[in-house]
């Protein structure tokens, strides 16, 4: 409820989540970013849809889709309740890295009031442990470069 409420108050709002399923109303933006996954560099793509005044962005990479069994979004954190996948740290690290790049690289023109990239003057709300690295990456990878 927070993103649509902020949008209704006149803010430009983007949510970012992994692309687990084939969200039928989300389209491929054709924008890709490089992210560090362990010792390798991977390419992540962005999908986008616009709902209730909110830019909904989905980070597309095989490491997210391969964990989904069917289109139920089940088994996305582990093979069974209470057991994590061994690559969760890498998957959610890459989500955080892509989330930090999205406002800078995506040119979104869905709204009648806003267009273009969000830029660097943004507020990130890290919701739950999946995005806990965002503040750390902001300080270590972006602030250190003057961004």
Image (tube, rainbow, N blue to C red):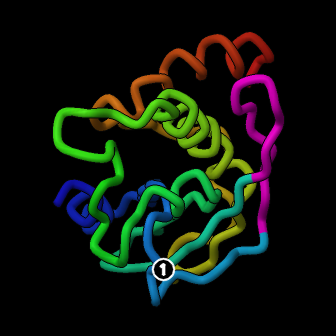
SS at mark 1? loop
Give above or below for 70 relative to 20: below
Give above or below for 110 relative to 76: below
| Residue with the mark numbered 1 | 22
39 or 147: nearer the viewer: 39
State the residue at coordinates (52%, 81%).
Answer: 26
59 or 108: nearer the viewer: 59
- Across and down, in percent, residue 115 comes to 63, 71
71 or 116: nearer the viewer: 71
- Across and down, in percent, residue 146 comes to 77, 18
State the residue at coordinates (38%, 58%).
Answer: 11
Q: Is residue 32 magenta?
A: yes
User: Which residues are drawn in magenta?
Assistant: 31-43
70 or 137: nearer the viewer: 70
- Across and down, in percent, residue 89 comes to 49, 27
Q: Residues within 10 Å of mark 1 (few under 14, many from 20)?
A: few
Q: Main secondary structure of the magenta part?
A: strand
State the residue at coordinates (61%, 38%).
Answer: 94
How many discs appear? 1
Work out which residue is located at the far bottom of the displayed protein and give it.
Answer: 24
In the drawing, does residue 127 fall left or right of residue 36? Answer: left
In the drawing, does residue 125 fall left or right of residue 98? Answer: left
Place residue 17 in its image quadrant. Answer: bottom left
Q: Is residue 33 magenta?
A: yes
- Across and down, in percent, residue 107 comes to 71, 67
In the drawing, does residue 50 fall left or right of residue 143? Answer: left
Quadrant in which the N terminus appears: bottom left
Quadrant in which the C terminus appears: top right
Give above or below for 116 relative to 67: below
Place residue 131 in its image quadrant. Answer: top left
């Amino acid at each position: 409820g927070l993103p649509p409420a902020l949008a209704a108050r006149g803010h430009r709002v983007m949510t970012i989540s992994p692309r687990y399923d084939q969200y039928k109303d989300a389209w491929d933006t054709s924008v890709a970013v490089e992210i560090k996954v362990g010792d390798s560099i991977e390419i992540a793509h962005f999908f986008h849809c616009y709902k209730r005044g909110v830019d909904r962005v989905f980070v597309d990479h095989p490491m997210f889709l391969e964990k989904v069994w069917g289109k139920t979004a089940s088994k996305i954190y582990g093979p069974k309740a209470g057991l994590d996948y061994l690559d969760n740290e890498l998957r959610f690290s890459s989500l955080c890295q892509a989330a930090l790049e999205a406002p800078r690289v995506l040119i979104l023109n869905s709204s009648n009031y806003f267009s273009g990239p969000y830029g660097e003057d943004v507020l990130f709300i890290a919701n739950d442990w999946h995005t806990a690295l965002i503040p750390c990456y902001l300080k270590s990878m972006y602030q250190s470069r003057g961004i």
